[in-house]
Image (cartoon, coloured by chain):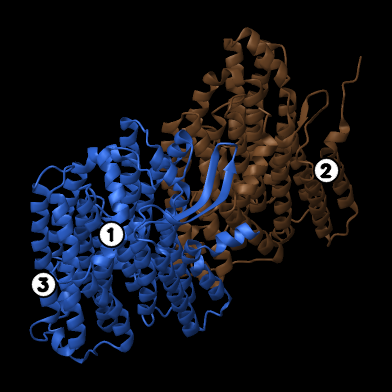
Chain colours: A brown, B blue
Amino acid sequence: MTIPDLNLAATLPLLFLSAWACGLLLLDLWAPKGSRHITGWLALSGLVITFAVVASNLGQREEAFGGMLAIDGFSNLLHLIFLGSGALAVLLALNYLKQHGIERGEFYALLLFSVVGMMVMGMAKDLIVVFLALEMLSIPLYVLAGFARPRADSEESALKYFLLGAFSSAFQVYGIALVYGATQATGFAAIGAAIAISGASPLLLAGIGLMLVGLSFKVAAVPFHMWTPDVYEGAPAVVTAFMSVGAKAAGFAALVRVFFDAFHLLTPDWAPLMALFAVLSTIVGNVAAISQTSVKRMLAYSSIAHAGYVFLAVLPGGKGALSDFSASAVIFYLAAYALTNIGAWAVVMAVEKGEGMGSEISDYAGLARTRPGLAMAMALFMLSLTGLPPTMGFMAKFYVFSAALAAGYTWLVLVGVVTVLISAYYYLRVIVFMWMRAGAGLAVTPRPLNFTVALTAVATLAFGLLPGPLMALVEDSVRGLF
Amino acid sequence: MAEFYRYLTSTLTVVTFFPLAGVLALLLINKERKDLIRWISVGTALLTFAFSLVMLAQFDSTDPGLQLVVRAPWIQIGSNWRIDFHLGLDGLSVLLVLLTTLLTPIAMFASWTAIEERVKEYMIFFLLLEVGMTGVLVALDLFLFYIFWEFTLVPMYFLIGIWGGKRRIYAAIKFFLYTMAGSILMLVAVLWLGTVQGTFAYPALAAMGGIPPGVQRWLFLAFAAAFAIKVPMWPLHSWLPDAHVEAPTAGSVILAGVLLKLGTYGFLRFNLGLFPEASRYFAPAIAVLAVIGIIYGAIVCYPQKDVKKLVAYSSVSHLGFVMLGLFALNDRGIQGAILQMINHGISTGALFLIVGMAYERRHTRELAEFGGLWTVMPLYGAMTLIVVLSSMGLPGLNGFVGEFTILLGAFGSQALGSYAYSIFAAFGVILAAIYMLWMFQKMFLGAVTNPKNETLKDLNWREIVVLLPLLALIFWIGLYPRPFFNLIGASVEQLTAALDAGTALVMH
């Protein structure tokens, strides 16, 4: 029996971060009770080091574990998104956990494990790896969602997430099994070759459909979105911030990898279904958000809507002239969403008063008077989420809409822009309360939170005014991959 | 680096972005130092106006093409997506840029005592708004145009929503969503043009032509949606009265004076410039809507109790004239329309300033609350009379020149093909006289009916300074409009030549 070529050296960031996370678990046993901070700062350093290593090596193109993992520009850029989100979440958690009395070292280790899982997802070139990564990133998230026990809604959200997540993983596995049954392979290249030879069979199509269902759950697309508002509201805000960005990005990474690489020949079969999910997500997400009075639930529904927008870029499918463009659009949108959303949730954390209070929109009244910088940043995030210039969110929407238009989905883009208009109403509502209504405007802003908000706000504006270099970087890194 | 420096110091870049320097300065000042904030803001706006005069000096009115062009690469996606930072000026936009840079310091100066709360943020939003408005007028890259277009919504939304009247939040959101609804359709059209035609640059798109008629009509409608809401054309005008009434005085001045013109400018630059065949096709329909707007706006003015609402509806009526002139699709019509855009900015801007002066004294805008003000404030009355007569279109003042040219254009227009438009529009002139004189009579003439009006002070020096430039322009354009027509003439001739041929607009 030959050992396949492992090429461990290429997976160094992965190995490093996993080892670091294990080290944190052990360290936490010996850290003195009052200095949980140390674990947090160490987690942050681990993430930053890995970020630097990955960033210096963006143009790699290798395979590992016998072709099951791909280390290329696409995966590296996604690594940056995951590591960045993780780092910002750790920064926010340093004070948030203590403020809410849930400071335990396992938090950081679990977060790191989840990041590792997400990274593996971005590198997947085999269906088994996809499933493995899915579980690896999800299980820590289930635990993290329930971190704020004994608060009832946190435990409820963890249980909901776990049950529904396990259910969707079952769909995913069944889909993988059916695809294996139809093509006798789990590697993407092999699957693609098998489809080229024998075409589509009902078994294969059923498998693809089930896999789409499983992954759509992860990215919170309609009609698999029911868990999102409750889980986002119940989980500790810092976990939600990380989860809403990281899990979504990982899900889309898997979608792009699987559907662009393995199933690209069957695009006419799965694209209509995905288009349906896209339209439903944007419509349902935006319309439902209008009636929300809780900012957390509003952001949860907006998350659903944003999943719909990203689907628009995944529609064109792979291995065509447009596939590079579409993949770049997906990455850019995920990066924009990561920066903007984490910033928005950071502000939510600042205004939240604990014990599930302080998350109504009315709690933001008067914020512009008392905390003008914070209010300005939140206004910027709301405008970016809507997709108004000159923010990064607008550039991302432009990118995604262009990809869909270039592929000929004009009607979908029209639906998309109408839903953008609908979304403007509820995003503006937050701005109205902050700037145009009188209120106490209380917020707690420890330094790391201030730093996070400032960083994400500046990035949102900077990449909105000068997106060129970033877009060029993304395009160059993704060229020729699909 | 030298390239960047060259882009940064080009005339149009300076005129567009200099207010940002004011914003930066304001950010550093303590918000309690209100007078310093006001002086810096007005100073920045005046400097911008000075720069725009330099721009005017550099403008060659015999050249019909785009001048003072700045083109810097901005975003490059793949090999075929290229978005540039592309600015340019021609006869169609030069007067509008000057109007913008003139009205902004005037409006800021008029807010001196009107705005006492959060002055710093107010001035910052105002300067940002100026950047956006000038940007819309000089942007030549469709994508850049769209960015500036959407961007102007944000500061205006804040200005109405924070410093406005009682129903300001409703008015602000209505303004924002209504305008965004149109512009979001325009985004799809812009994206389509960029994708299918392969470029976002306006000169290239105009020269390319070659858009099949069916598609051209859809694109025309998509752009028209955004612009028609902004103008506003009947029946998409219902956001305007609310926005104007609830906005602070200076906000109304800028809204009426400049922002509405962005809509008519958009029609002129993009609908007429890029879609000649569709323009011919839709000209009668748009002219009908324009005439309905003229008459409807005028009739609805009469029963208004709130003076500001009256002036708002008069805007709908006046801009109906502009739309009629534009879609006469001939030299006279379009030149008259552009001049009337300027005239409307001056006259209606002055009207809102005047209403604001009354409001500052009595804190009411109800017509019934006033009466006989001429005896109490003769200077105020005299200045108002001039502005009212200008708005009415009295010969000798600016309004007449514009309206007459438009009516001439519509009368002999091939695209419209009927005298009916001019006839009905001329009827609108009579109606304008009715509501304007009626308003003046109710406010100024007769005896002083309300005792509260007896002790009102006449205009102070600041208010006189604010109105004088506008009055000067009213007389200048009315008595000697030739220099203004000279500025617009060459570019309009080039545009109408292309429209007549139904061909692409190659800009020399």
Q: Amino acid at mark 1?
A: Leu
Q: Of A78 and A475, which appears nearest the observer? A: A475
Which numbered disc covers residue B437? 3
Q: Nearer the viewer, mark 1 or mark 3?
A: 3
Residue drawn at the location 76% of the way across and 45% of the way down: A55
User: Residue B456 appears at what percent x and percent y?
Assistant: 22, 89
The chain letter under disc 3 is B
User: Residue B145 appears at what percent x and percent y?
Assistant: 44, 51
Which numbered disc covers residue B240? 1
Residue that extends furthest to the top in the rendered view of this protein: A198
**Which residue is the site of mark 2?**
A17
Residue drawn at the location 9% of the way across and 52% of the way down: B424
Identify the image quadrant of the N terminus of chain B.
bottom right
Q: Amino acid at mark 3?
A: Leu
| Secondary structure under the numbered disc 1 in the rendered image | helix
Q: Of B201 and B301, which appears nearest the observer? A: B201
